[in-house]
Amino acid sequence: MEVRKNGTSTKALYGLAIALDRLAEKLRSNKLLVESIQAYENLLSYGKNIPEMLYKKVADRCINRMRFKGENARAITIHKALIEKFPTDVNFRNNLTITYLIIDKLVSARRNVLDTLKKWPNNGLAKTLYGFILKTSDNNIEKSVKYLKEGIESREPGVLDGRFFFHLGDALLRLGRSSEAMEVYETGVKEGFFLSKYQRSLYNVDRLTGRPWWTKEQTTYKKFFDLLEENWMNIRKEGLSLLNSKGLFKDEAENLIDVGDWKQFELFSRGRKVPKNCKQAPYTCSLVEFFTPASHCRRGQIKFSVMHPDTHVWPHCGPTNCRLRAHLGLKIPPKTFIRVAESTRTWTEGKIIIFDDSFEHEVWHNGTETRLILIVDVWHPELTANEKQTLPAI
Ligand code: OGA
Ligand code: MN
């Protein structure tokens, strides 16, 4: 086919791209999706010969389809072309920042958002995105509050996102401004981002029963938890001996520690065995492996958790309401506590406590000896078999 660079041919190309796109969705065909993206890209390469409105529309859809396919890096060229073509439209700059964030290019994201703020110092989304970077990547809590707060308060398109409310509340809390944090969380509930002011997970199945603390009976997994309790001495022996090998336990990596030292040794993660680690903990792994609501829980982990004296873990929420979290006490010195929502408990050696870690929880070790527990996540018992198979892993 000869393609001339005029209205007729671009129109024809557009028709082709749209047809491929629609068919790809209808047939859920990856091959057609690839072809439709190519057709959009092809069309965009005609640049000046395409009416501006059409160019924007095509570029927008092309980026959308690339995101859907997980090809965010490929969208950068299009973002940049849009910025060059429409230099006065701040949205195209913000969209580029978002893509950089999705693909974890934080240096580029920061550079781009600062550049955006230079030209549009009052843009709400740019402020919010910069605040998000300051909070999650730079750990500049104080400055992040200013930008997240002003950004969210602008209520401009794009700023009403649970993640921004989550991090603004967390930042306020860490600065000791807890009543302001609670206000942010309450607004987040009203906006539909959080299940409740304490239950602030962002990857939820909405109908599931949510309560901070669970009994073994309530989980429906009592037999399994009884089995763990019956064998706790052997689990403890294994966990304690692992502690003697330097470097096995890894530092908590989510920036949740206020002060202290908290490390973990992972046996299962996202429904899969960690073979290297299970070789070092064969007893515990074989004990939990057969129980698939735990070992196949793609939204959880099974891990030893060691906490040293003088540690405080900031109040935080897990990412999803699809799991419940059991703690088996293995070595529990005095003056160690965990608060979930409004009630605080401690561990007992050989006993399980169960909570829903999508609720805000906070941990203290004010004692003098190492504390060791085994953490076992299990699927929420109200999920259907189909959900357990198809929910994306976390
Ligand atoms: C958790 C947690 C665990 C611990 O299990 O989700 O935050 O090791 N704390 O005290
Ligand atoms: Mn936690």
Image (spheres, grey):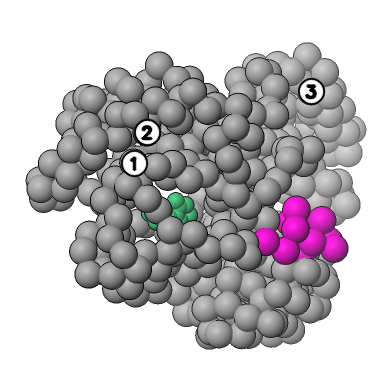
Looking at the image, which residue is at 72% across and 63% down?
A: 197
Q: Give the image quarter of residue 177.
A: bottom right
Amino acid of disc 2? Glu
Confirm whether residue 252 shows in the render.
yes
Q: Please name the residue that numbered disc 1 is placed on.
A: 350
Q: CA distance from mark 3 to mark 2?
A: 50 Å
Q: Estimate the x, y position of residue 24 in percent, counting from the top left.
A: 76, 20
Which type of secondary structure does the marked residue at label 3 adopt?
Answer: helix
Quarter of the image where the N terminus is located? top right
Evaluate if marks 1 and 2 touch, with contact meaning CB atoms under 8 Å apart: yes
| Relative height, residue 219 to residue 243 (above, below) | above
How far apart marks 3 and 1 lie (CA) works out to: 53 Å
Identify the residue position indicated by label 3 in the image. 25
Q: Which residues are magenta?
A: 188-198
Instruction: Label 1: state its secondary structure.
Output: loop
Magenta stretch encompasses residue 193: yes
Q: Viewer-proximal residue, 153 or 233? A: 233
User: In the image shown, does 335 or 17 lie closer to the viewer?
Assistant: 335
Q: Is residue 113 visible?
A: no
Give how far across and how far down residue 187 sits, in percent.
Answer: 80, 69
Q: Which residue is mark 2?
A: 229
